[in-house]
Image (cartoon, rainbow, N blue to C red):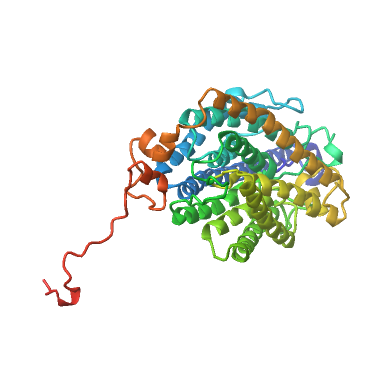
Amino acid sequence: MASPLSCAASDLAPLLGGAANSTAAAAFLCSRFSAISDKFVDTSYAVDNTYLLFSAYLVFAMQLGFAMLCAGSVRAKNTMNIMLTNVLDAAAGGLSYYLFGFAFAFGSSSNGFVGHHFFGLKEYPSPAGDYSFFLYQWAFAIAAAGITSGSIAERTQFVAYLIYSSFLTGFVYPIASHWFWSGDGWASPTRTNNDLLFGSGAIDFAGSGVVHMVGGIAGLWGALIEGPRIGRFDHAGRSVALRGHSASLVVLGSFLLWFGWYGFNPGSFLTILKTYGTSGNYYGQWSAVGRAAVTTTLAGCTAALTTLFGKRLLAGHWNVTDVCNGLLGGFAAITSGCSVVEPWAAIVCGFVAAWVLIGCNKLAEKCKYDDPLEAAQLHGGCGAWGLLFTGLFARGLYVDEVYGGRGGRPHGLFMGGGGRLLAAQVIQILVICGWVTATMAPLFYGLHKLKLLRISSKDEMQGMDLTRHGGFAYAYHDEDDLSMKANGFMTRKVEPAISSPTSYENTPAV
């Protein structure tokens, strides 16, 4: 944010040559100068808030991407259910984050573990932030809830979505974001008292851990406690593919998420009008914003291509759904270090992220773990890799520019910065795993014991659109789904019928 320029009449008057009324003239000039300075400060606030609002809109647009991706990844009989849960994540998350979540996350001044100001946005906005900051952080909170909904899709009761979504966005996620993003957080790299974890704090710039690991690990526990979908594994324990009904929706959702990620990662700078070094230079925070967009792009593209050829070698075919998941895995991984790594390092990040996702999926299959959207593997596994990657490849110059304070901060191990940043990253991984496990696992287990978590076998076989939402999303059903045949429900694709063998060539023109 621009600082106001100062002008004192006592300093300016001698420069007027001691002429008559020089003091009055100096006071007048200083008043005009101060007015212009105030306008520049106002403009700086307006530009930065507009930038943050636009970024918030992009991140919120990712909800549409989540909805399309989820809809395409489930079977047609559960389309309306999964779409409704995505709407619910945003709606329930909005109220819970407004009432409690934002205060727990950013209610400064506070202690290192939880915020305790701004409940219901009381006494907000303040010098600490404006409404645009709240909106931006809310969009992040509901993204974490959206990740979890993918892991437990096609078999979860509606009331369970309401409970877990409110709890995650109102308490679990905000506490984690306070620890690593708030100026008071015990592991934050921007901690105001400079008492930083290992002298650096954990660098999780846009949320590989805070958003993606939180959502992914929450989904992991939900899916583990619920168990796999009916038919996902046969009686011999072999994996059976329950394919999503629309690759078109998966691709559409992936592109919408890609578009929204340009608000997710570059937008996490929060401001854009900030110089690095002397003013009047072409290089500043606007350059770092562009670099974050470039590293995000390169990591996603590399992960997508690596997955394409990797799955071709392993499975023998080109699968668009796998490529889309690989793309998103690259994005989830680079989210932590997008602002502090070189573009070439982002290629390394994306390459490894693709293999992390493939490996996590292999492990999930062996453990008979069922996640319809691979959300836990993608966001949890690739998010953890992203944190480690930052501890290895963060460049010292970029760390100093983005996080400020004293120079010479610890940076990436492979970039000559020692192991302190990497140690902080490992601590973040362990803490997030422990925190989400300690909060979300008991919640899902309690819902399971109260019979509020999983739907009945009959409802699952018939599909929740029919049993819970009044009918199918559209008159279409995959003929490969044996569960519907067993219950006498079968809707076939309607093909054009030819009433006569007469060819169109012999039909007289009308």
Residue at 77% x, 44% y is 403
Residue at 52% x, 46% y is 232
Q: Residue furthest front?
A: 236
Which quadrant would the N terminus be assigned to in this image? top right
Q: Is residue 404 left or right of residue 72?
A: right
Q: How many marks?
A: 0
Where residue 444 appears, as percent x and y from the top left, is 59, 29
Which sits in the foreground, 335 or 438?
438
Camera sees residue 1: no
Residue at 73% x, 42% y is 5
Where residue 276 appears, as percent x and y from the top left, is 76, 51
Q: Is residue 403 left or right of residue 455?
A: right
Q: Residue furthest bottom?
A: 505
Where residue 491 appears, as percent x and y from the top left, is 32, 49
Figure quadrant of residue 172: top right
Which sits in the foreground, 244 or 264?
244
**Relative height, residue 78 to residue 492 (above, below):** above
Q: Is residue 19 left or right of residue 416?
A: left
